[in-house]
Amino acid sequence: MNAPWKSGVAGTRDPIHAYVCDDATLEIVRGVCEEMGWSQDKAYKGGLRNATQSLSVSASPHTLLVDLSESGDPIGDINGLAEVCEPGTIVIAVGQVNDVRLYRDLLMSGLQDYLLKPLSADALREAFANAQSMLNAPKQDDSNTDRPHISTAVIGTRGGSGASTIAASLAWIFSRAQGHSTGLLDLDVHFGTGALAMDLEPGRGLTDAIDNPSRIDGLFIERAMIKANERLSILSAEAPMNSPVLTDGSAFFQLQEEFRAAFDNTVIDLPRSMLIAYPHLTHDVNIAVLTTELTLAAARDSIRILAWLKQNAPHCKILIVANNVQSAVVEISRKDFENTIESKIDLLLPADPKATAQAAKLGQPVVEAMRSSKLSSGIVALADMISGSLAETAEAELTSAKAKKTVFAGFKTMLMKK
């Protein structure tokens, strides 16, 4: 949607704007633009800063080429460009730095491609052709599709019970193995490991959301989240320890609403302390996975959390997962643990320090790094249990959504008659 203070009308965007730093690159860009049938006058001298200034007061083109050569902070400057660039614009960058990490970070920031200088006409033609293919691809119309959203919260009874490891792995399975668009929301604002588990920088998305709840919308979600793969996006943080979380929880409510609109699945890494401060976090959760170890302290805290969930989220399906289980060394047997908490354990996951250590070294979820391990097999089984448990939930949710539409439609008709 065009901002009201910008010139231009939706549907009449220019096909290309280019902002480059040197004459040689400008000559190549203008030559390729002429071949494509585009105006050479839309290729300007000036890099990323000039692009940001120009697009803050004018309509964005369909394709934008920006030169990063004079930028001291490419990622920060690209994020600044994103603030003024309208949705739907395909951005291609050129630059002099040949660094794989920079290339990956730029793509994670939403760029379509990054071309090295000196720029070749062939590479530019290919990049423009790929951009045109994306722009001309048929758009999938989901406006009339009733798609139930599935939300899974992973809660650890105590630190070290593996909740974050399991949450990251579940999100990976939902996105890769099951092919669902998935959002991972890591609500451990100061010490979250959702991004770290996938060798990513968390960025400021979550802290910005907490500080400015009114900014949270679909576009904010698109720009603030980091992509782990083509179907998995993460919202995480590493807030300074001297910055306490000061919020009434409205930001978390808004985030969950936008996640429901943007993804098929949401996985929430939900620290148990957040339940106390923000009980509404579980209101839209379908499945609560409670991870625990077979210890006396964990049994006590399992009882308390299960009672809390029963009172505050009675609609949730609860799955209890005993993690880090060593058959030869357990503080409490499975049977005694179940008798103590008055609930059955749904799944046992074995202790596998080698698999978790290797996953950490590779910067991958354990289900990706060590696929053949017993731990990975157990988490895959948990993902299947969640999907199976939610088959009826999804159908019920779909039926409920259709019923609400009928009620609201009837209510609207009644008002019109009045």
Image (cartoon, grey):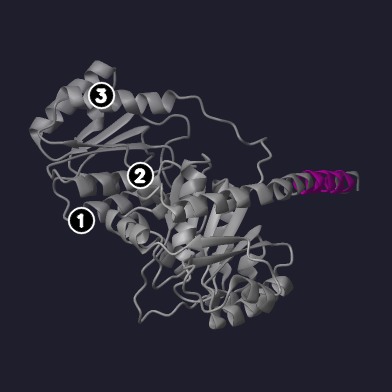
Residue at image mark 1? 73
Assess whether residue 404 is covered by the magenta stretch: yes
Q: How far apart in space, not on screen, are marks 1 and 2 (Cα)?
A: 16 Å
Q: Quadrant of residue 30?
A: top left
Q: Position of residue 217 (x, y in %)?
A: 52, 54
Q: Name the amino acid type tagged 1.
A: Asp
Residue 183 seen by the camera? no
Q: Secondary structure at mark 2?
A: loop
Q: Is residue 234 above or below residue 292?
A: above
Looking at the rendering, the stretch of residues picked out in magenta corresponds to 400-414
Viewer-nearest of labels 1 and 3?
3
Dot 1 and dot 3 residues touching (CB under 8 Å):
no
Tell me the crowding category of disc 2: few under 14, some 14 to 19, or many 20 or more residues within 10 angstroms, Cα based. Answer: some
Is the stretch drawn in magenta largely helix, strand or loop?
A: helix
Closest to the observer, 123 or 352? 352
Residue at image mark 3? 126
Residue at image mark 2? 110
Q: How far apart in space, not on screen, are marks 2 and 3 (Cα)?
A: 18 Å
| Residue at 79 percent of width and 49 percent of height | 404
Q: Name the amino acid type tagged 3.
A: Glu
